[in-house]
Image: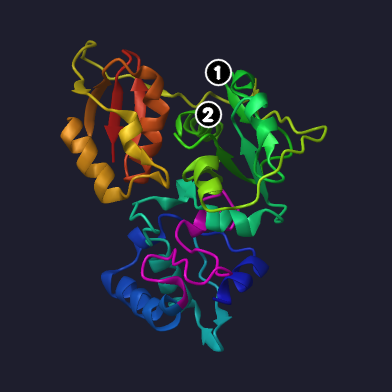
Amino acid sequence: MVFVVAVLAQNWVLDRELPSRLTGEDLERGRALYISYCERCHGADGDDSGYPLITPLSGLSLRLGDSRVRAFAGPSFYARGRFFPPAEARALMAHILTLPGEKGYSRPDAIVSPQLLGQKLSDSRYMVIDVRSQTEFGEDHIPQAINLPPENVAERARPRLAPGLSDRILVLYDDGAGLQAARVWRAILDSGHRAVAVLDGGIRRWRLENRETSTRVPEGTSVTLLVDSPDLLPVSRTATIPGRSGGAGIPLNVDWNATVTGKGFREASELRKYFTAAGFTGPGLYRLEGAQEYADLFALQMYLLGFEARSTNDGEIEVTL
């Protein structure tokens, strides 16, 4: 769809909250426009892979590379030989911001498919970061990726993105389990940077799709993502809940290997069903039984499903909408 180029040219700032501020009539108008002008190429979910040169649209607010959240001004644009005036442009973009992606997530902006990343490797706005060990990185990695070994990721009281990265889209990947990538994803979010996503399925899915890898390790392939800031208040990863003591959380017995497949995280419906069977009932307090190290992976999966998850001072996890 040609309008994406027009969006970039006008430096649009998309507002993730736009759909919630429009009327039902506006949203229905946007849906009708999408069906008429976009669905044939992009599919009903926005991530149709039948056209390899088409950029997936779900999670568009991240994929345009602007992490700021501002009021959407609704400029007009041309697409497919048609002029979309501001009201139509606004309605159409609102619908696009609700697209669930290939796996039906409420917030697909937190992950990137190999198909999309493969199109963006030469795009200077994207920085691909391999969070595996130096040894694994040397054996093979995604071309142009930079290595950030686990030992180089430290907890920071006042995290801030390192200088020069604020205008970059950061794409993280690990072996495919998601544990290491989720840890760095959460740390970057804590710094206030929103344009960050995890490669769905990691390098395992990348290889399964027969995409190019490299063994070349040039100098300067390590990166510092986060630094301590004395000027910013910390973005707390913990929630203090007055009037309660530890041990009140609902226990979750999760086999984390069961939440992923060779093609990345399970689809939204499967993930919800699995967590429900493990004891998840929606917003509330939870306790990861013997698996506190998976808190960040749980937070990422909750985010994809439309929730927010924060560790409490008692070592439990508060899940909110």
Q: Position of residue 137 (x, y in %)?
A: 66, 32
Percent coordinates x, y for residue 257 in the rendering: 35, 32
- Whether residue 70 appears in this view of the structure is no
**Disc number at residue 155?**
1
Residue at image location 28% in from the left, 43% down from the top: 271
Q: Is residue 42 magenta?
A: yes
Alpha-carbon span between mark 2 and mark 1: 8 Å
Identify the residue at image location x=69%, y=40%: 165
**Element type at marker 2?**
helix
Name the residue rendered at 62%, 73% in the picture. 6
First to last magenta residue range:
41-69
- On-image quarter of the C terminus: top left
Residue 108 shown left or right of residue 190 in the figure: left
Residue for point 43% across, 73% down = 92
Whichever of labels 2 and 1 marks the residue nearer the N terminus, that label is 1
**Image side of residue 116 versus residue 301, left or right:** right
Which residue in the rendered view is the most extreme toward the right? 219
Magenta stretch containing residue 205, yes or no?
A: no
Q: Position of residue 284 (x, y in %)?
A: 21, 30
Whole-percent x, y for residue 217 in the image: 77, 34
Looking at numbered disc 1 in the image, what kind of residue is underneath it? Answer: Glu
Instruction: Confirm or deny contact between disc 2 and disc 1 (CB under 8 A).
Output: yes
Of 133 and 103, nearer the camera is 133
* Vertical comparison of 240 with 176: above or below: above
Q: Which residue is mark 2?
A: 187
Q: Amino acid at mark 2?
A: Ala
Residue situated in front as seen by the camera: 196 or 209: 209
Label 2: few (<14), some (14–19) or many (≥20) C-alpha neighbours in 10 Å = many
Looking at the image, residue 2 lies above or below residue 180: below
Decide if residue 142 is on the left or right side of residue 260: right
Judge whether residue 61 can be spotted in this image. Answer: yes
